[in-house]
Amino acid sequence: MLLLVLGGIFAVVGIVVVVGVAIDPGSSALLSMGIVFVVVGAILLAVGVAIVGGQRRRRRVLAEGIAGTARITSVTQTNTMINNQPVMVLRLMVNIPDRPPYEAHLRQVIPFVLLMRAQPGSVVAVKVDPNQADRPVIDWNAPVAGGVNAYAGGGAMAGVGFAGAGLPAGGVGPANVPVPSLPPYAADLPVDQLREQVRSMGATGRAVIDSVQPTGAQGDRAGFTLGMWVQLDSGPAFRVDNAPAAVEQVYAGRVAPGVTVPLRIAQVRPGVTMTVLEWEKL
């Protein structure tokens, strides 16, 4: 509201000066000052209208929107401060009833008192306008009754291996996720060669890791059990829990909640898929 008032004052003063100079031509410097006041006033008015409109939309969505939850997958600080509060860019994995999880990005002011809650891996309550689902509103005051649930559409996608090595293992995901099939001979290849086949032919996507449990060494690799959201570029997001991973030691230090890792996934044989997390691309 303050910006609207200041913008109005600047615009009115500028218009009065410009009109006065037009009626009684005088100093060009005075005319320039009037034009500057008009421009500054217009900018302040535009910013004020945008802020007021955003506040009204937020109140409306919080009152009428569909309730859901969202897991924060990444947080990026900008160079902008509003009222001495930082403006942050949040990437969310949003979950609302009757819809598979989807990604959304928000750019908003995060008060310092809320910064500890705005961390990768945190789950927050949201409200969503179904006509603008890509612009969820975080309800910082609402309790979160549990985490983000997996999309229940489809069935099981068996034999998903999440690893630096891509070792086949159990996993969960929609049965209708479209992934390429490797040539029949690939199933008989050694693991290292099979992994390279998946890297070259597999569908691309990314895994957003939100839980990590070390399980000890697996040969020359570090073992983990991971929980994550998987988002393929060619399909819906789906949830994977308790996914075994064998990661090369050089990348083991990068395995942490909040990390987003590029991946490749392909079908090795009917009913068996293999996923390779590409830690080297981080």
Image (cartoon, helix red, strand yellow):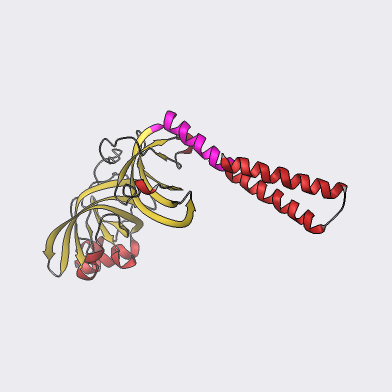
Reply above or below: 188 against 51: below
Quarter of the image for residue 15 reads top right
Residue 242 seen in this snapshot: yes
Camera-side residue: 263 or 112? 112
Percent from the top left, x then y, of residue 281? Answer: 34, 66
Residue at (39%, 53%) from the top-left corner?
A: 233
Asked if residue 265 is among those painted magenta in the image, a careful observer would answer no
Total numbered circles = 0
Residue 189 seen in this snapshot: no
Quarter of the image for residue 193 reads bottom left
Residue at (85%, 49%) from the top-left corner?
A: 22
Residue at (78%, 48%) from the top-left corner?
A: 17
Percent from the top left, x then y, of residue 3? Answer: 58, 43
Q: Which residues are magenta?
A: 49-66
Residue projecting furthest to the top: 64
> Mainly helix, strand or loop, the magenta region?
helix
Q: Quadrant of the N terminus?
A: top right
Percent from the top left, x then y, of residue 145? Answer: 26, 35
Camera-side residue: 199 or 88? 88
Percent from the top left, x then y, of residue 236? Answer: 36, 46
Camera-side residue: 268 or 16? 16
Residue at (28%, 67%) from the top-left corner?
A: 196
Direction from residue 271 to residue 38 in the image, left or right: right
Asked if residue 61 is among those painted magenta in the image, a careful observer would answer yes
Residue projecting furthest to the right: 24
Direction from residue 1 to residue 226 in the image, left or right: left
Reply above or below: 39 against 247: above
Quarter of the image for residue 99 reads top left
Q: Quadrant of the C terminus?
A: bottom left
Direction from residue 81 to residue 166 in the image, left or right: left
